[in-house]
Image (cartoon, rainbow, N blue to C red):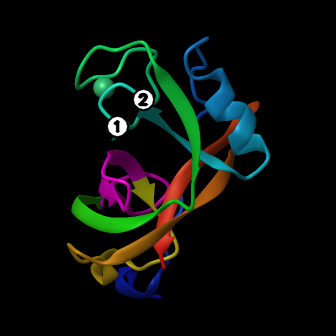
């Protein structure tokens, strides 16, 4: 099988969980993707922080997102021992950029502007992590 026809996948280590991000990982375990929105300035952000990165307000609330967006940028790593994989940024429909792994697509099947949707990939000994696949 040639590399171009393989769908990428790779083991992902368990994420580090902090008090700030624990609600996110609890939701991820249930298959729900959360972002945070600031009630001060109205902007959504990711990853989740206690203080809004735009206006430093502490008035941030959790919001469930369908996890849909478009690829902003990506790079394919060809020399990994577990096979090629791709990481990059997704711009969510709500606005925030998410640094993520891309799955369910061949390395040459990715494109900037492609519509993608979140899914959750199990990790060893931790909650599942959000990854993105073509929508
Ligand atoms: Zn704000």
Question: Mark 2 near ligand 1 (CB under 8 Å)?
Answer: yes
Q: Is residue 91 magenta?
A: yes
Q: Residue at x 42, y 72 (%)?
A: 116
Q: Position of residue 131 (x, y in %)?
A: 51, 55
Asked if the residue at label 1 sits under 8 Å from ligand 1, the reply is yes
Give the CA distance from mark 2 to mark 1.
5 Å
How packed mark 1 is, by other alpha carbons closer than 10 Å (few <14, some 14-19, many 20 or more), is few
Magenta residues, start to end: 78-100
Counting from the top left corner in percent of width and height, residue 125 is at 76, 30
Can residue 11 be seen by looking at this rendering?
A: no
Q: Residue 5 location, x and y as percent?
A: 43, 88
Question: For numbered disc 2, what is the local secondary structure?
Answer: loop
* Left or right of 68 on screen, residue 123: right
Q: Which residue is mark 1?
A: 42
The image quarter containing residue 102 is: bottom left
Q: Position of residue 100 (x, y in %)?
A: 40, 49
93 relative position to 17: left or right: left
The correct choice, above or below, for 22 with respect to 25 in the image is: above
Asked where in the image residue 71 lies, by quadrant, the reply is bottom left
- For label 1, the SS is loop
Relative depth, front residue between 108 and 101: 101
Going 38% across and 63% down the picture, which residue do you hit?
84
Residue on which the image places disc 2 = 39
Q: Is residue 103 left or right of residue 77?
A: right
Residue 91 visible in the picture? yes
Considering every residue shown, the one lying at the far front of the view is 40
Left/right placement of residue 24 relative to residue 101 reads: right
């Amino acid at each position: 099988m040639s590399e171009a026809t393989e769908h990428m996948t790779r083991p992902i280590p368990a994420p580090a969980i902090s008090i700030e991000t624990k609600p996110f990982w609890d939701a991820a375990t249930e298959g729900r993707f959360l972002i945070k929105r600031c009630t001060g300035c109205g902007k959504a952000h990711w990853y989740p922080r206690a203080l809004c990165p735009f206006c430093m307000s502490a008035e941030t609330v959790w919001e469930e997102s369908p996890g849909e967006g478009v690829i902003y940028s990506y790079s394919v790593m060809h020399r990994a021992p577990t096979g090629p994989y791709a990481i990059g940024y997704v711009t969510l429909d709500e606005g925030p950029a998410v640094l993520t792994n891309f799955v369910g697509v061949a390395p040459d099947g990715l494109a900037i502007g492609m519509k993608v949707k979140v899914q959750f990939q199990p990790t060893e000994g931790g909650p599942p992590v959000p990854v993105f696949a073509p929508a």
